[in-house]
Amino acid sequence: MLMPLRLFARIGGFDEGYRLHAEDLDLCRRAQEAGAFIAVANEVRVVHVRGVSSRARPLFVEWHKHRGLWRYFGKFEAARCSGLTQAGVFAAIWLRFPFAAMRALLRSRSREMA
């Protein structure tokens, strides 16, 4: 991710309320709202070696991933949605959590065995 330092400072940098995940979405959203052009370079290939925290603390990572999505929704979208829609988004995020957590635990354990 590249961004001019002046823009980064003007929009207040990263929101420290995110622990893991969605902070990049938040930053891009605020940059766009400040008038910046957001571009995605889909043709660029990057090798991402799975994070150490994902292996060592899979439940922690999944919890904060889901928490970050809920924070992002609440910060940018919730005010424009009905209470029913907000409840639906909350349910979609948090009902997914146990399945994502179980998958992450199983992946973590299978990597330990390998």
Image (cartoon, grey):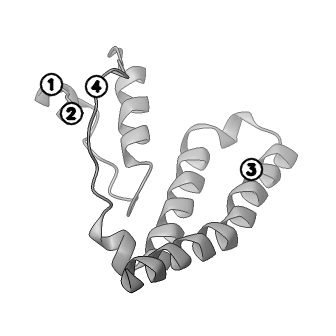
Closer to the N terminus: mark 2 or mark 4?
Answer: 2
Q: Indicate the secondary structure of the residue bearing disc 1.
A: loop
Q: Quadrant of the C terminus?
A: bottom left
Q: Indicate the secondary structure of the residue bearing disc 2.
A: helix
Q: Picture coordinates of residue 3 (x, y %)?
A: 20, 27
| Crowding at mark 3 (Cα within 10 Å: few <14, some 14-19, many 20+) | some
Q: Amino acid at mark 3?
A: Val
Query: Marks 3 and 2, how far apart in space?
Result: 29 Å
Q: Where on the picture, by quarter, is residue 19?
A: bottom left
Q: Residue 8 has which mark? A: 2
> Circles 1 and 2: CB distance less than 8 Å?
yes
| Crowding at mark 1 (Cα within 10 Å: few <14, some 14-19, many 20+) | few
Viewed as shown, does residue 78 lie left or right of 71? right
Q: Residue 89 has which mark? A: 3
Q: Residue 44 has which mark? A: 4
Query: Marks 4 and 3, how far apart in space?
Result: 32 Å
| Crowding at mark 2 (Cα within 10 Å: few <14, some 14-19, many 20+) | some
> Circles 1 and 3: CB distance less than 8 Å?
no
Q: Where on the picture, by quarter, is residue 28?
A: top left
Q: Nearer the viewer, residue 43 or 58?
A: 43
Q: Which residue is mark 1?
A: 4
